[in-house]
Amino acid sequence: MSDTCVSHNTRQDIEARAQGQRGCVVVPYPDPRAGQRTSRLSPDQAANVMYRAQLVDVEDEENLYYPFASKIEWEVARWAKLRGSSSTAFTDLLSIDGVSERLGLSFKNANELNKLIDHELPTGRPKFKREQVIVAGESFDVYYRDIIECVKSLYGDPDFARYLTFSPERHYADDDETVRLFHDMHTGKWWWETQKKLDAQQPGGTIVPIIISSDKTQVTMFCNKTAYPVYLTIGNIPKELRRKPSSGSHVLLAYLPTSRLEHITNKASRRRAIANLYHACLRRVLAPLIPAGTEGISMRSGDGARRRCHPIFASFIGDYPEQLLTTGVKFGECPKCDVNAKDTGSNTTQFHLRKLSEVLDALAAFDDGNLAFVRACAAAGIKPIIHPFWEDLPFANIFRAITPDIDARCRRLPPNHHIRLFTKGITCLSRVSGTEHAQICRFILGIIIDIRLPNNLNAGRLLRAVRGLLDFLYLAQYPCHSSETLHSLDEALDLFHQNKDIFIQLGIRNNFNLPKLHAGRHYHLMITLFGTTDNYNTEYTERLHIDLAKDAYRATNHKDEFIQMTRWLERKEKILRHQKFVSWCLAGEQVMTKHPTVKAVSFQKMVEDYGATHFHEALAHYIVHKRRGDHSVPLRDRELDLLAGDIHFPFNRLPVFHKIKWCSIDTGGVTKGHVTLDSVHAKPQQKLGSRLIHRCSDTAFVRLGEDSVTNDLKGFSVGQVRVIFSLPQKSLQVLFPPTVNIPPHLAYIEWFTPFPSAPDRNNGLYKLSRLMRGGDRVSSIVPFGDSAPREWTSETVLEDCNVFWVNSYIDRYTFSIFR
């Protein structure tokens, strides 16, 4: 077997092992005392039981919604605080004559509801406090919470109790323990190494990795009103929960001052004062971690078990400006290593992580006078920051803790679940968001495949450069890595650097001395230390801004807003905590059944409107094959046609589905609800007035053979889905023997040619065309598993074009198949 085949099969195996679908070898930490309980599991100390005990004067044991008088009162209160309009609008609603009485509410306005929440509901998370921090003789307000109490609230959340990790592990893909796997934080090297350092001082402790993120954000569309939130989460919570803001796995820890210090006219002095203000505030907020990280504190998880926990600063998440502000490194340089700013565009220049000991020695020179301090910091490669927040944090290394931050043809792409159509092209985009960047990555290679470059420059180099960068971006998003996939990550970055000069020759750039590009060289190390990149993605912070900063600001009257914002958040958190308690008491869930989009579609309509030209023949062939079962002798085409001609359908109409979705299945039971991974549309053409709306028939990968489980390309083919339908239950007894099981959903597919033996050398994509026989498109019925010329348009391109490139960048799963 070739090395390439082994590499491909190994890659396909990794995600399945990480998600529990296949076994992986787990090597526990050698000292069994690490992460052990210090007291027995006590059911009466479980979080929800203790929450019930905190409810004031529980007079009615049968009222699960106390302190709310009834279910409807609780639902109204929850709606008002989580989904409702402003307090004024809510008061106006309740003031309508008869509304409050008919609903049976004990509160008549928003103020009365707020008092009920403030005085009757237990405090799930600590309250905010306001303190003044003095920098350069000026005082600034910082709103923050006790970080230890915030950590306890996350660690003790009953929803997380089943999933918390308490000790490091090493995961391997093979029994010989040669292929190391990295995914969640406890599988990285940082936790293992830090546990060893902690055990040397106090054996038997449980590390609680502290993950901090910060990012200044604008809370209004106009007036430039900003907030500076700081968020906290812990690495004991699985990344599947941490990457979902709705899970409540992040806590708003503080609002930092947003002053620009414009009264300081000297720009260098102003920048230095802003940096010192930032560090002074965070130092105040994170100070309790110093004794707690060293000595440990007793903490109770949601199931009532106690452990001696050591909250240790592990990771800082922020964009490049935040990284510079945090580390004190100058603009244009790497916040992690000592590479020269003019060499950040090189993929071969040697570098070393900045030495924390040298930086700490420079910071200690502050007591020797200002001039000596400035010179010492300059020699160490940082700005003269007075006592940065990370200076005294135990077991912390800020330079390791910093994690990397990750045209006309666009109007004529065929629609797809994962593809956004930029109907005006992409050249008109002025401010491209992170989401739009990700959407463009999914099709950019396909639209430059046959581009003609000026001066007869080699287009192959452009394709290889773009392909290398795209491969790197997609590999970096893997939810599980091994030593082999990390090698592929490095190879993809090398491919880009080997061909990047084409952009200079085209006049697009003068050089590639970009710190963010250089950060790609640190991905390999960061993944081995802290797990895969979805442990520390800046996208999560950006999403938290909406829930915890922008929505909070909109709920204020814009005067003394931070006092109102913190109070609004405290009330929202109390409602969310009470919601968990009520759900625990009820412990019930209902799932609705699915119905077809159209209950009865005639065969003629399937041909005319859905484009299923040979539906009748294909369904007859499918029935013949299912009747024969696992017959060892295949039928010839003539024999198959003769048998199919004897099939008589007990129906002439079928129920049809216009959309089918694939949802995520969490084998570990970590996440709740469903996440749509992909979907296929098969919609008919229809008239809207005088306008004809073209049919939508998506393409899809079809697994060859119902029992096939391989992820190799040989196990797939590409087809265009024309109709998704079901056979009536009553007709199954007439058409099939009782031993034959028919899937609930079937699809009429038009096929494309098989995958060639190798992709294109430059772009790495596979070239396909329509599969034809006798001038007609080859089609068949397959089961669904239970688990740019100007005349082209997005709606008709699949009909008008004869040759296609298979897009391997649709999503991460598709990309992994083609690697």
Image (cartoon, rainbow, N blue to C red):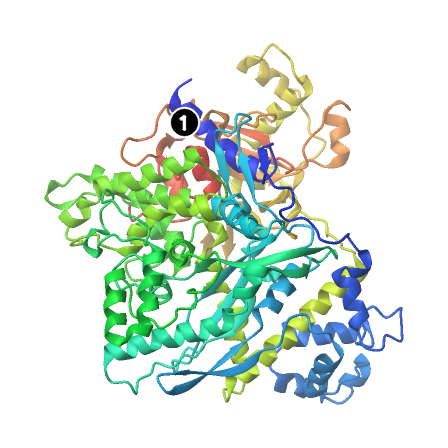
Q: 100 or 544: which is nearer to us?
A: 544
Q: 376 or 382: which is nearer to us?
A: 376
The residue sitting at the top extreme is 633
Q: Compared with residue 36, is residue 638 higher up or lower down, i.e. above or below?
A: above
Answer with the quarter of the image where residue 110 lies: bottom right
Q: 760 or 345: which is nearer to us?
A: 345
Q: Say which quadrant the C terminus sits in.
A: top left
Q: Say which quadrant the N terminus sits in.
A: top left
Residue 349 in view here: yes
Where is residue 517 shown, x and y percent of the image?
Answer: 29, 51
* Three-letter amino acid code at the position of disc 1: Phe
Q: Compared with residue 817, is residue 46 higher up or lower down, i.e. above or below?
A: below
Where is residue 279 shown, x and y percent of the image?
Answer: 40, 72
Residue positioned 41% across, 65% down in the render: 391
Residue 413 in view here: no
The residue identified by callout 1 is: 755
Residue positioned 72% across, 88% down in the render: 96
Where is residue 388 shown, x and y percent of the image?
Answer: 39, 69
Q: Compared with residue 707, is residue 487 higher up or lower down, i.e. above or below?
A: below
